[in-house]
Image: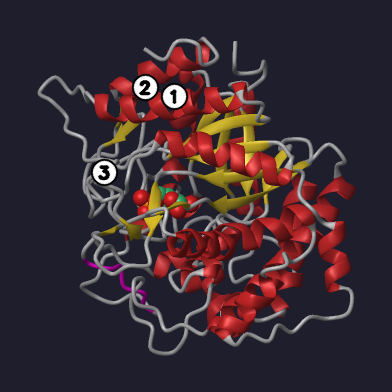
Amino acid sequence: MAFPEGFLWGGATAANQYEGGWNEGGKGPSGADMMTNGTHTMPRQITRTWEDGLFYPNHKASDFYHRHAEDIALMGEMGFKVFRMSINWTRIFPTGTEEEPNEEGLAFYDRVFDELRSQGIEPLVTISHYELPFALTEKYNGWASRELIDLYVRYCETIFTRYKDKVKYWLTFNEINCGTLPLGNFMGLGILNEGTCDFANQVDDPQLRYQALHHMFVASARAVQLGHSINPAFKIGCMIAFMTNYPYSCNPKDVIACQEKNDEANYYCGDVQVRGAYPHFAQSIWKKYGVELQMMDGDLEELKRGTVDFYSFSYYMSNAVATGSDVEESAGNLLGGAKNPYLKASDWGWQIDPDGLRYTLKELYGRYQVPLMVVENGLGAFDAVDEDGAIHDQYRIDYLRDHIAAMEQAIEDGVDLMGYTMWGCIDLVSASTGEMGKRYGFVYVDADDYSQGTFDRSRKDSFYWYKKVIASNGEDLD
Ligand code: BG6
């Protein structure tokens, strides 16, 4: 049997895309609450106030805030061993700067963790998943300011202390490396430069972005040390959006361009968080963008002391890197690239590549030699409900089966893989487009792109399939 005993099978969500209840229970607005709906051809707008005539899909999201008991029961029915979720920072500190946390927010997550425990499900908590208090964007331009380190650490101390006996697995920042891309300014770093109006075309200043990343690295390192001091049994990981790239051809120019893209977008952040030091190629990245990083005494030592216990990542697709201009382009999770003639793509243009997951797992384990976890993977697709209310999502089963088989091969190749949480296990709002119609779930949520619907939950065919996969510990993939 390839999958080890105790393998953590489950699903993943993020509060801002799933929870809703955006202004209930004392919660303050987060960055995600300021983003309108969009499509893959019409970018989401970012507004500093809520404008009439615009729609903000994260406000209600999938309404987990009111339906957590029902949803967790469905996860229990599938046999989940783990549920990846995030804590909405603004439920705990509505503007990020309060001295005292919001008790109503803390109590909500107590209920969620207790329900998970009663179903035998281990929570895996992302501390910050694209939901920075919007007040911190307004006051400090997000992580561009060093002030955020202490505010984040206070938030961590509050939740580590409160949930020390309820949560063991933590991730400090979701997809921290989206901060290496201009697209990551607002969602990842909380930076909203003057002139930015939409998600796809943000006014970018690499100096601010790389400085913000430095602050996040220091904050993450402090959180890891603090967490271990509060409960030595905590396992605290990093989370990287892994954007697997292949050279488009064997032209050495393509190979070098691909290596450089990987260094910058994929390895820069993980190297700091796992190895505790900036990689050798950091200097050339800073030089390329004219970045002069400001560090304080002790920062580099802090990074060394606060390395993570495991490496987690999202994997959806792969891209190719070409230096020539005569290649077709392809879309992607955060980053596009050249179209790979050997791969098919989803309706959103993301190229489907299970072999790429095996390749990525081997690359990562070879590089870091720490336990790995795939904490996001899945297929965003349009689902149709037939007259009997059934949802036959064989395309999703096919996608997942091939990716699980790829993990199995990687384990046989010697990779230490802790678990797998399929993204958007219950339908939720897409991060990049704000659509509900881009569905990932095993469970269908009856709501459209404008939060119209009953929000009733129904089991898709993939629900029953995944239940068998978990029950057989990955043996039965038919
Ligand atoms: C990851 C994010 O980038 O991809 C999630 O961590 C996101 O928040 C997921 O939802 C899928 O992307 P999208 O744009 O299809 O929602």
Say whether mark 3 is within 8 Å of ligand 1. Answer: no
Q: Dot 1 corresponds to which residue?
A: 74
Looking at the rendering, which quadrant does residue 392 occupy? top left
* Closer to viewer: mark 1 or mark 2: 2
Residue drawn at (59%, 66%) of the image: 94
Looking at the rendering, which quadrant does residue 468 occupy? top left
- The quadrant of the picture occupied by the N terminus is top right
In depth, the one of 191 and 304 nearer the eye is: 304
Q: Earlier in the sequence, mark 3 or mark 1?
A: 1
> Few, some or many C-alpha atoms within 10 Å of disc 2 (few <14, some 14-19, many ≥20)?
many
| Position of 162 relative to 210 (above/below) | above
> Tag 3: residue type?
Ser
> Tag 1: residue type?
Leu
At mark 3, the secondary structure is loop
Quick check: marks 3 and 1 in contact, CB under 8 Å? no
Question: Residue 444: x and y, percent?
Answer: 30, 33
Question: Residue 266: x and y, percent?
Answer: 56, 57
Quick check: marks 1 and 2 in contact, CB under 8 Å? yes
Q: Give the CA distance from mark 1 to mark 2.
A: 9 Å
- Say which mark, if any, is on residue 346: 3
Per the rendered image, the range of residues in magenta is 42-47
- The quadrant of the picture occupied by the C terminus is top left
Q: Earlier in the sequence, mark 1 or mark 2?
A: 1
Q: Dot 2 corresponds to which residue?
A: 463
Residue drawn at (72%, 61%) of the image: 272
Q: Main secondary structure of the magenta part?
A: loop
- Say which mark, if any, is on residue 279: none
At mark 1, the secondary structure is helix
Q: Give the CA distance from mark 3 to mark 2.
A: 20 Å
| Position of 136 relative to 447 (above/below) | below
